[in-house]
Amino acid sequence: MSRTYDTPQDAEDAYYDALEEGDLEILLAVWDESEDIGCLLPMQPLAQGRAAVRDAFARLFARGRQGIALSVKHLSWIETDQVAIHLVEESPQDHGPDGSPPLVVYGVNIYRRGTGGWRLILHQNAPPPPPAGNLPPMAR
């Protein structure tokens, strides 16, 4: 059963809801059916194609947690009639095992509109850069 997402935001909401619920099938339904999709999670190799994206999230969910609750803050949107790029800040709701605050990461979600509505084609996460005073000389 495939759902149609009328806007990129509808697809994004469904993606983060499925991630929080730990529902791999619903999460994958947000992704485009083509093989030219990709996902780059922190400290993981690039997953390209449906099978690799499925495997990446199956491994993520198999780490002893069913679902990942995130607070998502939208930082920037670029949208055209066919493509949408959303830059977000993702903050895990859970603290680390030692009680440390969760690591905030930046995410980029790219959506493409097709005959079945909007679908995710790329998701990438990266940790934030260190504070400006701690940047290596080339990054300043």
Image: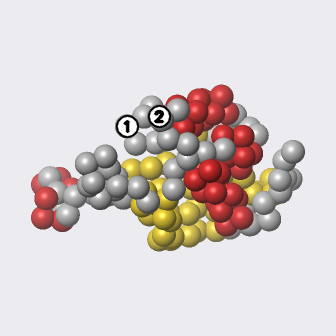
| Whole-percent x, y for residue 23 in the image | 66, 44
- In the rendered structure, the answer to whether residue 106 lies left or right of residue 80 reads left
Q: Residue at x 14, y 53 (%)?
A: 136
The kind of secondary structure element at disc 1 is loop
Going by the numbered disc 1, the residue's amino acid type is Met
- Report crowding for label 1: few under 14, some 14 to 19, many 20 or more residues within 10 A (C-alpha): few
Q: Which residue is mark 1?
A: 43
The kind of secondary structure element at disc 2 is loop
Going by the numbered disc 2, the residue's amino acid type is Arg
| Whole-percent x, y for residue 139 in the image | 21, 56
| Whole-percent x, y for residue 124 in the image | 49, 48
- In the rendered structure, the answer to whether residue 109 lies left or right of residue 114 reads left
| Whole-percent x, y for residue 28 in the image | 69, 42
Q: Residue at x 32, y 50 (%)?
A: 96
- In the rendered structure, the answer to whether residue 89 lies left or right of residue 135 reads right
Q: Residue at x 26, y 55 (%)?
A: 100
Q: Residue at x 39, y 50 (%)?
A: 126
Q: Quadrant of the N terminus?
A: top right
In three-dimensional space, the C-alpha distance between marks 1 and 2, rounded to whole angstroms, equals: 14 Å
